Image (cartoon, grey):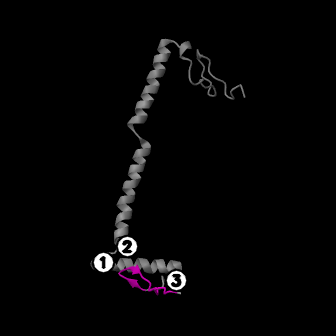
Amino acid sequence: MDKPIIPTMPSSSAGYHHPLLRRSWPPDLSKMSPSDRYRLERKYKRRVRIRGAHPASWMRFTGTLQLLTITVLPAYMVLIMDWPMAHPFGPLREWMWRKIDGVKGTTFGGHLERGKATEEKPVPGPR
């Protein structure tokens, strides 16, 4: 396909701007006047500065990681983690495990101990 689908702008743009016309890229700097060349360099240097000043993807990743740390870690500590002492959130944990057992339709096969489902499994012997 030799011809572009969308026509390109001529080097000297007319007064009327057609919305479907696009500039050819990369521009031929030898055909541009020094003032047009300077304007083009200034525009793209500015865009590079703006893009480098605000790394959006890094900021989004860092913010998401902070939110996950702030929400998931305390939830894990309150609902799942075993503590070496009597658990201060025992009733909440028992309620949570009852709800999980209710959703599954069965229990884990054991009883709730400090909010955690435990199961007594026989130790397999030699066959």
Density class for disc 1 (Cα within 10 Å; few <14, some 14-19, many ≥20) is some
Identify whether 31 is placed above or below 125. Answer: above
The CA distance from mark 3 to mark 1 is 25 Å
- For residue 13, side relative to residue 54 (left or right): right
Badge 1 element = loop
Where residue 98 sits, quadrant-wise, is: bottom left
- Camera-side residue of 62 and 7: 62
The CA distance from mark 3 to mark 2 is 20 Å
Magenta stretch encompasses residue 119:
yes
Q: Which mark is residue 79?
A: 2
Residue at left 67%, top 28%? Answer: 6
Identify whether 85 is placed above or below 125. Answer: above
Density class for disc 2 (Cα within 10 Å; few <14, some 14-19, many ≥20) is some
**Mark nearer the N terminus (3 vs 1):** 1
Q: Main secondary structure of the magenta part?
A: loop
Residue at left 67%, top 24%? Answer: 7
**Mark nearer the N terminus (2 vs 1):** 2
Could you say where residue 82 lies in the image, as x and y percent from the top left? 34, 75
